Image: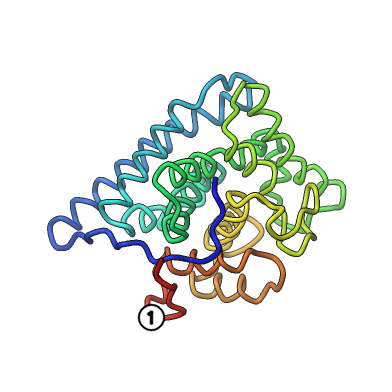
Amino acid sequence: MGMTTCCRRRRPSKRADGDDLVDEARQARGLALRSATLMSALFTRARLGKLAETGDAWSIAGAIGDSLDRHPDAFLTVMHLRSADEYTYLHSLSVCAMMQAVARHMGLDRGECLDAGLAGLLHDLGKTLTPPAILNKPGRLTAAEMRIVRRHTEDGRSMLESAGIAHRASLDAALHHHEKFDGSGYPHGLAGERIPLVARIASVCDVYDALTVDRPYRTALAPGEALRRMQSWQGHFDGNALHCLVKAIGLYPGSASCPSP
């Protein structure tokens, strides 16, 4: 995935209105339901060590990209309204959509956007090996539990490699989506542009989605509050990726305009 230095304004897709918008929302809901079924099966295969190929995931990423082409907001809105049940694979669907949207605002080409989408679907695959009692624990994790949770990045990469999946963006996102721009993240403490671009995009999308969904240990934040909190975490994110996330989700359409390409 190529590098980019600024959030670039893509030529906006023609937005649906009236009956077209209602139809796209209906299509997006159907796509979300079908994708959730496929992702549940994929995560189950991964947990059982039977992940052999990613054909379903490619199809999902492509269909979500097509939905974003028709109407940039419909699928993201459907995912925002989801329940907190079956968090991990629904989270991955949401991150897939957001990563493609952010990649578009960064000016990446269609192939790179699709790569980002597949990486979003697979970024948390390693959590299928994390005990649910730890993932869903209402209280603070112990140091030992935190070490177990943090293993999901290396577990995810290993699962993909063991299945013979050599998709670079997915491998990088799985391993590095918890790296921080100032070098204080894990597993390798990478900083700045040493963190692969796809992982920097995954980081902002992963955190934003996690903050805006109810979890056993935390009530969901409103979208605007989640972004304000993320913007206050100095050194945590690639500033350009975070800026393009704001543009992609469209909360503040009049703010911080991106330079034209």
Q: Position of residue 35 (x, y in %)?
A: 40, 37
Toward the right, the furthest residue is 143
Which secondary structure lies at badge 1? Answer: loop
Position of 152 relative to 3 (above/below): above
Q: Quadrant of the C terminus?
A: bottom left
Q: Position of residue 85 (x, y in %)?
A: 51, 46
Position of 221 relative to 48 (above/below): below
Left or right: 7, with 88 as reference point: left
Bin the neighbour count of mark 1 within 10 Å (Cα to Cα): few under 14, some 14-19, many 20 and up: few
Q: Tell me where residue 107 sits by quadrant.
A: bottom left
Residue that numbered label 1 is attached to: 254
Picture residue at 87% right of the left edge, 46% below the top: 144
Please name whichever residue, 76 or 139, is drawn nearer the observer in this view of the structure: 76
Please name whichever residue, 110 or 136, is drawn nearer the observer in this view of the structure: 110
For badge 1, the amino acid type reads Gly
Left or right: 26, with 218 as reference point: left
Please name whichever residue, 78 or 183, is drawn nearer the observer in this view of the structure: 183
Q: Tell me where residue 226 sits by quadrant.
A: bottom right
Q: Position of residue 74 (x, y in %)?
A: 31, 56
Q: Position of residue 156 (x, y in %)?
A: 67, 35
Position of 110 relative to 261 (above/below): above
Toward the front, the furthest residue is 261
Left or right: 35, with 176 as reference point: left
